[in-house]
Image (spheres, grey):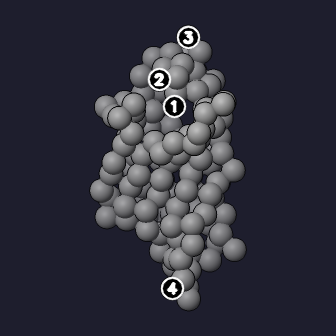
Amino acid sequence: QVQLVESGGGLVQAGGSLRLSCVASGSIFSINAMVWHRQAPGKQRELVARITRAGSTNYADSVKGRFTISRDNAKNTVYLQMNSLKPEDTAVYYCNADIVSYDLSHQDYWGQGTQVTVSS
């Protein structure tokens, strides 16, 4: 079985920074794309940032220039460095990954989410 566990959320003032981490564990052969999503109250879940195994990245327009996604393949970990945070960044942030098992099948997994709250 595979688990994704996020950490690093919390309460921060506008203009501040947070760094989220997501560690994948379990029966993992390799991990393809790793993605951060977020869902604010009353809104649909949205993609925040995505990184391929090779390190190619893409971002939602709303976070470009402020957020940076990175990963450590040896540690099965993806990070999201969030700078210049705004109140509208307040949401539950979820980690998502396309994980390849030892039988070479792959499946999408999700973490449980971590709350980020930005006060004005």
Q: Which comes sooner in the sequence, label 1 or label 4?
A: 1
Which percent across, then down, holds residue 11? 63, 24
Instruction: Tell me, for residue 109, which label it has, or none.
Output: none
For label 4, the crowd category at 10 Å Cα-Cα, with few meaning under 14, some 14 to 19 and many 20 or more, is few
Disc 2 element = loop
- List the residue tagged with mark 3: 120
Report the residue at 54% width, 19% height from top.
87
Q: Which comes sooner in the sequence, label 1 or label 3?
A: 1
Disc 4 element = loop
The answer to whether one can see residue 16 in this image is no
- List the residue tagged with mark 4: 104
Instruction: Tell me, for residue 85, which label it has, or none.
Output: 2
The answer to whether one can see residue 4 in this image is yes
- Residue 54, quarter of the rendered image: bottom left
For label 2, the crowd category at 10 Å Cα-Cα, with few meaning under 14, some 14 to 19 and many 20 or more, is many
Residue type at the position of mark 2: Leu
Disc 1 element = strand
Q: Which comes sooner in the sequence, label 4 or label 3?
A: 4
Residue type at the position of mark 1: Leu
Q: Nearer the viewer, residue 26 or 40?
A: 40
Report the residue at 41% width, 52% height from top.
50
Query: Disc 2 versus disc 3: distance between alpha carbons?
Result: 10 Å
Q: Do tag 4 and tag 2 residues touch (Cβ < 8 Å)?
A: no
2 or 1: mark nearer the eye: 2
- Residue 45, quarter of the rendered image: top right
